[in-house]
């Protein structure tokens, strides 16, 4: 038995890496980068473990806008909604994933909400109709929001077949989301390009 265990250990040590780094590059059909898209990866078609959520999550109210416009949090996360404006805000969501109301509160005050189900939560302010934002509550440990260059980066994705989902609030697709199949290399870094079609935002020039 000891000899078999030693042989297995040697074989494992000599085997190639079983995970790789992945960059998903999201662009429009004409090549423009798409920030604020949420990319989720499901190795083998299954959610990756979330792990312990020790992060601090917030959507601030500043200059009569929500910041960030899109927030990604794991299932079970608590999100704070601090007000940094000189006016009161009334934050709400009618989304089935999490319905709530944070009634009028003033500058330097904050309220918090826990999100226990995966899905999209659209936010608004009952006082200022121009304020909109989205929380994407994810059920997989591989989830990221694209940066200004349209890139979402992932480290240590298990090699093999995987499903990737790309969501954006203005994406032209059912539920504003597309799905594609990937083959993740066992080592090194690879880039997957994704082209999407977007609707015009409610206010031109914002949130792209």
Image: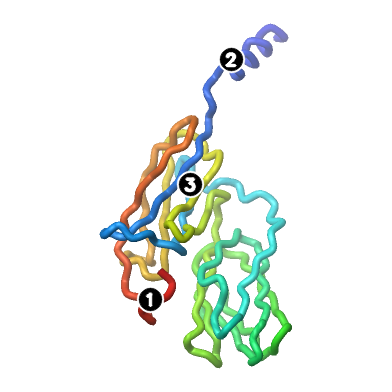
Say if 156 sits above or below 111 in the image.
above
Residue 128 is situated, as x and y percent measured from the top left of the image, at 52, 90
Picture quadrant of residue 9: top right
Residue 42: numbered disc: 3
- Check disc 3: other Cα within 10 Å, few if <14, some if 14-19, many if 20+: many
Q: Tell me, yes or no, whether the two marked residues, 1 and 3, touch with CB atoms within 8 Å.
A: no
In which quadrant of the rendered image does the C terminus lie? bottom left
Residue at image position (66%, 49%) is: 51
- Quarter of the image containing the N terminus? top right
| Mark 3 vs 2, N-terminal side | 2
Q: What residue do we see at 67% from left, 67% from top?
A: 78
Disc 1 from disc 2: Cα separation: 56 Å
Label 1: which residue?
Answer: 205
Q: Residues under labels 3 and 2: Cα distance?
A: 27 Å
The residue shown at (50%, 59%) is 145
Marks 3,2: beta carbons within 8 A: no
Up/down of 65 relative to 151, above or below = below
Taking depth in this image into account, of 109 and 2 the one nearest to the observer is 109
Secondary structure, mark 2, is helix
Residue lying at the far left in this picture: please name it: 30
- Judging by the rendered image, the residue that carries numbered circle 2 is 11
Nearest-to-viewer mark from 1 and 3: 1
**Discs 1/2, front:** 1
């Amino acid at each position: 038995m000891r000899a078999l265990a030693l042989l297995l250990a040697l074989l494992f040590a000599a085997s190639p890496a079983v995970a790789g780094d992945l960059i998903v590059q999201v662009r429009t059909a004409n090549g423009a980068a798409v920030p604020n898209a949420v990319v989720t990866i499901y190795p083998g078609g299954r959610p990756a473990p979330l792990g312990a959520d020790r992060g601090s999550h917030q959507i601030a109210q500043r200059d009569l806008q929500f910041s960030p416009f899109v927030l990604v949090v794991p299932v079970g996360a608590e999100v704070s909604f601090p007000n940094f404006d000189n006016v009161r805000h009334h934050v709400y969501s009618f989304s089935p994933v999490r319905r709530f109301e944070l009634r009028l509160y003033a500058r330097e005050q904050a309220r918090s909400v826990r999100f226990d189900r995966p899905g999209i939560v659209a936010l608004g302010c009952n006082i200022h109709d121009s304020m909109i934002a989205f929380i994407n509550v994810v059920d997989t440990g591989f989830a990221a929001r694209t940066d200004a260059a349209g890139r979402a980066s992932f480290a240590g994705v298990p090699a093999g077949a995987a499903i990737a989902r790309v969501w954006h609030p203005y994406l032209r697709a059912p539920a504003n989301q597309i799905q594609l199949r990937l083959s993740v290399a066992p080592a090194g870094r690879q880039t997957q390009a994704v082209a999407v079609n977007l609707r015009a935002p409610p206010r031109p020039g914002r949130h792209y």
